[in-house]
């Protein structure tokens, strides 16, 4: 079973619709992240959460909101989707141990198309 | 502020040839450096990570990278390319060892010619 899961994997929607992307993890990590990937731009951080009560904006948070429902769940919402939000969205998790092996673990991604 | 520059958005090599993917970083504090790989239709997975100590870091699948502070570089190499290495590779930098705030480069797509 995957440690970091994302639903849906693919979504096509229309301009103005509200969309929620969900992320769940079984790794027991405190920290969770949402990124978007666009060709030629790499991954850009949208929001991150270091625990259930801690939510922070990333580099490109405008037009997005998040909810950390539990340690294991972190949802990303597009309140009113627009075409330039068409992208591949990734959820990631990490711990806060500061150990040499610490890394971010990524989900499989959600491909979102806004028409 | 930290940043990462990957030189070459697309690199093509023959099977069995040397793979060299270039990465330069900018950081005001000692950096933690990463290479991630993304296979088609998959998420990113860590290839290797530099924290402190030995500047030559060995990762999975025969890849390695060398941290050169004087050149602010962290280039990724593999002596002999395999068809299965075809993927997109991302260099990244973080200020802290917990990998909490990672800045990614724009990626380099590696193609392998038979």
Image (cartoon, coloured by chain):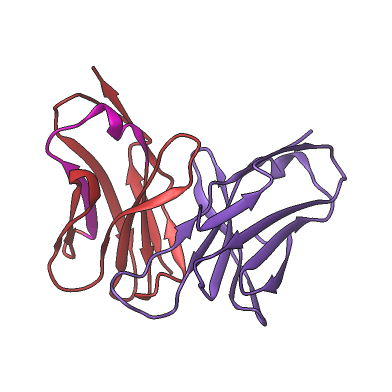
Chain colours: A purple, B red
Residue A20 at least partly seen: yes
In the image, is A22 to the left or to the right of B52?
right
Q: Is residue B100 above or below residue B105?
A: below
Q: Is residue B99 left or right of residue B73?
A: right
Q: Nearer the viewer, residue B54 or B83?
A: B83
Give the image location of residue A113, x and y in percent: 71, 36
Q: Residue at x 67, y 82 (%)?
A: A53
- Inspect this view and state whether residue B12 appears: no
Q: In the image, is residue A89 above or below residue B54?
A: above
| Residue A71 position within the rendered picture, expressed as x and y whole percent measured from the top left | 62, 74
Residue B57 appears in which quarter of the rendering?
bottom left
Q: What residue occupies the far right of the structure in this picture? A: A16
Residue furthest to the top in view is B114
The residue positioned farthest toward the front in the image shown: A1
The C terminus of chain A: image quadrant = top right
In percent of width and height, residue B10 lies at 35, 31
Residue at 18 percent across and 65 percent down: it is B69
The quadrant holding residue B34 is bottom left
Q: Residue B7 colored magenta?
A: no
Residue under the image location 51 percent in, 65 percent down: A93
- Indicate whether residue B83 is drawn in magenta: yes
x%, y% of residue B20?
20, 39
- Residue plotted at (29% across, 50% down): B23
Give the camera-side residue of A110 and B72: A110
Placement of B51 over or under A78, stated as above or below:
below
Range drawn in magenta: B72-88
């Amino acid at each position: 079973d995957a440690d970091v899961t994302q639903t849906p994997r693919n979504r096509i929607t229309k301009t103005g619709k509200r969309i929620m992307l969900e992320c769940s993890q079984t790794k027991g990590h405190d920290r969770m992240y949402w990124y978007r990937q666009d060709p030629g731009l790499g991954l850009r951080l949208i929001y991150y959460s270091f625990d259930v009560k801690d939510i922070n904006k990333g580099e490109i948070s405008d037009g997005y909101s998040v909810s950390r429902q539990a340690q294991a769940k972190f949802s990303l919402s597009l309140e009113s989707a627009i075409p330039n939000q068409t992208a591949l969205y990734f959820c990631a998790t990490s711990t806060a141990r500061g150990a040499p092996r610490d890394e971010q673990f990524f989900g499989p991604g959600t491909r979102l198309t806004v028409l | 502020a930290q940043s990462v520059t990957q030189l070459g958005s697309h690199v093509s090599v023959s099977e069995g040839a040397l793979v060299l993917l270039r990465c330069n970083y900018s950081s005001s504090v000692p950096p933690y450096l990463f290479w991630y790989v993304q296979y088609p239709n998959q998420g990113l997975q860590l290839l290797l990570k530099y924290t402190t100590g030995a500047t030559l870091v060995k990762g999975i699948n025969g890849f390695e990278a060398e941290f050169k502070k004087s050149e602010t570089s962290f280039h990724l190499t593999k002596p002999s390319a395999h068809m299965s290495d075809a993927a997109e590779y991302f260099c990244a930098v973080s200020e802290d060892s917990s990998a909490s705030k990672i800045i990614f480069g724009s990626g380099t797509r590696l193609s392998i010619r038979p």
